[in-house]
Image (tube, rainbow, N blue to C red):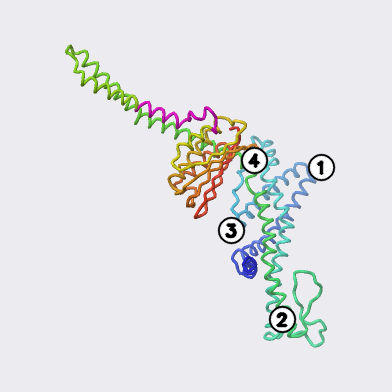
Amino acid sequence: MHLHETVRTALRAPFTRRAWAEAAYCLAGFPLGVTGGVVLAVLLALGAGLTASLVLAVVGVLLLIVSLRLARGLGGVHRRLAAALLGERTPAPPPFRPGDGFVGRLDARLRDGTGWRAAAYVLTKLPVGVVGGYAVLWWVSGLVNLTAPPRWAVLGQQPAADDPEGMPIVTPVPFGGLHADTFAGTFLALALGVGTLLSAPWVTRIVVAGDRWLIRALLGPGRLADRVRDLEETRALAVDDSVALLRRVERDLHDGAQVRLVAVAMGLDMIRARLDDGHPPDVARVRQLVDGAHRNATEALTELRDLARGIHPPALDDGLPDALATLAARSTVPVDLSADVPVRPTPAIETIAYFCAAELLTNVIKHSGATRASIDVTRRDGLLRLQVTDDGRGGAVPGAGSGLTGLAQRVRTVDGRIDVRSPDGGPTKVTVELPLRA
C-alpha cells in the first residue's frame, strides 16, 4: 500500500498546483536573481575597491550604501515573490534606524545588518537563480518532447532527406546528441518527455527548498530581532497576566471575603447593641448572632485560604513532587504520578509547572472522558519536563476552550514550550518544557 501511494504521488506530481507554483517561482526568479545578483556584485565590487583608495573613498562609501539599499529593496521583492507563489510568508525585518548627524547616518548605513544579510541573499540568489532556470528547463524539454510525434506527423517537421541526424530530441541532461530519424523514433522522445516531466517537479522542489531556507535565514528579521520581539511579546504577556491576577484577587476579595467580614462586623455590632441596651440579653438571639458571625468568619477564612492557594499553593513549600502528589490525590480521575527532580527549580518555575499540571488535570476531568491519567516530571537536558497523559477521547486543540492557549502564553514568559498531541480517539499527551531558572 505504501508503494502504491508513492507511485501515485509521483505520477500526480506534475499536475499539482504546488509543482506549477514552484516552477513559476523558478522561472520568475531566474531573470530577477541573475540581474539583481550581477548588478549588486558590480556595485559592491566598485564600492569596496574605491573605498580602499584614498582619493575616491567617499564615492566608494556612497556606492556601498547604495548597494545595501538596493539589496534591501531586492530582498523585499524576493520575499513578496515567495509569499505570492510559494506561500512562504517571512516576517519583514525591522526598518532601518538612521543615526544622528551626517557621519552617524553613514555609519548606520554601513552597519545595517539587515542590508548586509539581504546582500548575501541577492548574491547567493545569482547561482540559485541559474540552477532554478535549469530546473525550469526540465519542464520545457519534457513538454517539447511530448509533442515530437504530432510535430512529425501533423506539422511535417520531418528531417530533410539529406539530414543524417534526424529530428533533435531535447534533454536537460547532456547525454550527447539524441535524434529521431524515423516516426517510430519520435515515440522514444515521447517516453523521454514523460520521464522528464515526472522528474521535473522534484528538481524544482529541491531548488525551491534551498531557496526557502535562504529566505528564512537571510531575509527575515534575524535571530537577534526575533529574540527581541519574542521578549517584548512575553514581557507584555507577563504584565497582562500579572494585571489579570491582581484584578481577580481584587474581585474575589471584594465579592467574597470582604462581604463576609462586613457581615461579621455587623453581627458583632448587633451583639454589642443588645448587651449595652440595659435589658437582660436574649440569650437565644445573641447565640444566633454569634453563630452567624462565626459562620461568616469561617467562610471568610476559607475564601482567603483558597485565594492564597491560587496565588501560591502552600503545598509547593515542600517542593514540586509533594505539591503534585497533593494535586493527584484530590483528582476525581485516578492519577499515576512519577516525579524525579533531584534539583529544585526556582519558585517561579515550580509555580508555573504546578499550575500547568493543575490546568491540564482539570481538562482531563472536564473534557476528556478519561478513566485514568498520569503525570510525569523529570529533569532532562537542563530542562524541567512535565508530561500529562490520559486515555480519553482526544481531540484537544489550543484555542478550543481548553485553556491550552493560556498555558502556552504562561509558559512562553519563561522561554518554555508546550507540545500537544491529541489525535481523535486519544490518547492525549501534553508536554511542557521549562527552564530550571526563570
Crowd class of label 2 (few under 14; some 14 to 19; many from 20; radius 10 Å): some
The reply, left or right, for residue 301 in relation to residue 280 is right
Q: Position of residue 121 (x, y in %)?
A: 70, 51
The reply, left or right, for residue 289 in relation to residue 119 is left
Amino acid tagged 1: Ser
Q: CA distance from mark 3 to mark 2?
A: 38 Å
Give the mark nearest the N terminus, 3 or 2: 3
Which image quadrant is residue 274 in? top left
Q: CA distance from mark 1 to mark 4?
A: 34 Å
Residue at which label 3 appears: 84
At 65% from the left edge and 64% from the top edge, which residue is drawn? 23
- Mark carried by residue 53: 1
Tell whether position 319 is magenta: yes
Count of marks, rendered view? 4
Q: CA distance from mark 4 to mark 2?
A: 57 Å
Give the mark nearest the N terminus, 2 or 1: 1
The reply, left or right, for residue 342 in relation to residue 270 is right
- Please identify, in this view, whether the residue under mark 3 or under mark 1 is nearer the observer: 3
Kindly state the secondary structure of the residue where label 1 is placed: loop
- Please identify, in this view, whether the residue under mark 3 or under mark 2 is nearer the observer: 2
Asked if the residue at tag 1 contacts the one at tag 3, i.e. Cβ–Cβ closer than 8 Å, the answer is no
* Magenta stretch, main secondary structure class: helix
- Please identify, in this view, whether the residue under mark 1 or under mark 4 is nearer the observer: 4
Asked if the residue at tag 4 contacts the one at tag 3, i.e. Cβ–Cβ closer than 8 Å, the answer is no
Residue at which label 2 appears: 187
Tell whether position 62 is magenta: no
Residue at which label 4 appears: 224
Amino acid tagged 2: Phe
